[in-house]
Image: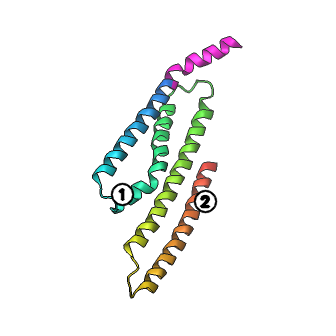
Amino acid sequence: MLDALQVGLKAWLWPGISAILSVVVTYAIYRGALAAFRHFSESRAVLRLFVDAAAGALGAVFPLLALTGTLASAPPDLPLITGIHHTATLLLVLAITWATVRLTSAIGEVIVALNPVLEGEWKRARKVETQTRFLVRALKILIVIIGLGAALM
């Protein structure tokens, strides 16, 4: 029993180290790029609103992409590789769904921000805001259904 465990751990040594290293390096590069983007962009720019809305979700997507790629290149005869690869792919689908929902919320915020309430046009602005919130909510529900469907496949 102990010998089988040692053989399994020895087989996972380099693929495990490369998987952990790829996740850590990808996350560090993402955080550095995000900090540089936030430093050099205006706080109310449209692209900045999208990046800020999805920053947390994208912080999960990119490392999971790196992990999935690393696990795909691992030897197929490793113990538990299929289960771990399936779990990483499932988490990647859920993270992409989360990022897409956050980006959809940002679309609604941008539309509302681009249509401010002016003194004589508060009814029009309120109408645009209500329609936008309704459409964004419906789109988010559709995205979640598609994401959960993809995760269950």
Q: Is residue 153 visible?
A: no
Residue behind mark 2:
145
The answer to whether 119 is drawn above or below residue 94 in the figure is: below
Give 76 or 131, whichever is nearer the viewer. Answer: 131
State the image coordinates of residue 141 (x, y, percent, origin top left): 59, 64
Q: Residue furthest right?
A: 1
Q: Which label was assigned to residue 7?
A: none
- Tell me where residue 115 sits by quadrant: bottom left
The part of the chain drawn in magenta is 1-16
Question: Which residue lies at the image location 30% right of the left edge and 58% below the top edge?
Answer: 42
The answer to whether 25 is drawn above or below residue 36 in the figure is: above
Decide whether the magenta segment is chiefly helix, strand or loop: helix
Question: Which residue lies at the image location 49% right of the left edge and 21% below the top edge?
Answer: 14
Do callouts 1 and 2 mark residues in contact (Cβ within 8 Å)?
A: no
Q: Residue furthest bottom?
A: 120
Q: Quadrant of the N terminus?
A: top right
Three-letter code, disc 2: Ile
Q: Is residue 67 left or right of residue 29?
A: right
The answer to whether 114 is drawn above or below residue 20 in the figure is: below
As measured in the structure, the alpha-carbon distance from the residue carrying label 1 to the one carrying label 2 is: 27 Å
State the image coordinates of residue 66 (x, y, percent, origin top left): 46, 37
State the image coordinates of residue 125 (x, y, percent, origin top left): 43, 81
The secondary structure type at the circle numbered 1 is: helix
Q: Residue furthest front?
A: 119
The secondary structure type at the circle numbered 2 is: helix
The answer to whether 116 is drawn above or below residue 120 in the figure is: above
Residue behind mark 1:
48
Choose mark 1 or mark 2, whichever is in front: 1
Q: Is residue 4 visible?
A: yes
Q: Residue furthest left?
A: 40
Three-letter code, disc 1: Arg
